[in-house]
Image (cartoon, rainbow, N blue to C red):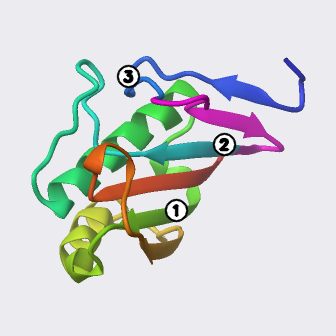
Amino acid sequence: MSAEREAVRAAGAPAAIGPYSHAIRAGGLLFCSGQIPLDASSGELVGETPAEQARRCLENLASVCAAAGTSLSAAVKLTVYMTDLGAFAEVNDVYGSFFEGEDPPARVAVGVAALPKGAQVEIDAVVAL
C-alpha cells in the first residue's frame, strides 16, 4: 500500500459487491465508491421508494466517511444516479435533510437505465479529510 493512496474499509457499510474498495484516501480527499441502498448486515436491497433508497445510500456513505475519520458534512461533491428522474423532488428532499444548515456540496444528478441489484438510486462522494 502506497502512502499516497490508502484503501478504506468500513465495517458499518455493506460489503462491496465487486472488486472495489469502500473508498480511497488520497491527496487530502476521500473518494467514496457509489453506494446503493443495501443493508450492511444482510447485503439485501432496502427501501421501496427512491426517497427511502436515497436515505440508505447516504447513511451508507456516512458510515464510509466515519471509517475514514471524516463525515459526510465535509463532502465537496456527490453524484446521484437515478433510474427515474421523475423522482428527483423526493430524492432531493431526503438529500437536503443530510446537509441542512450548511453550505451543501456540489452535486450532479444523472438518469441511468439501470443500477446494480435493481436499485433505483446510487450515490458516490468526494469528501475532504
Quarter that holds the N terminus: top right
For the point 49% across and 23% down, the residue is 10
| Residue 78 marker | 1
| Residue 12 marker | 3
In the image: residue 41, left or right of residue 22:
left
**71 over 125 or under it: above or below:** above
Nearest the eye: 117 or 129: 117
Q: Residues within 10 Å of mark 2 (few under 14, many from 20)?
A: many
For the point 21% across and 76% down, the residue is 87
Q: Residue furthest left?
A: 48
Q: At which x and y percent is residue 68? A: 59, 29
Q: Amino acid at mark 3?
A: Gly
| First-in-chain label (2 vs 3) | 3
Q: CA distance from mark 1 to mark 2?
A: 12 Å
| First-in-chain label (1 vs 2) | 2
- Pointer 2: what residue? 30
Number of disc labels: 3
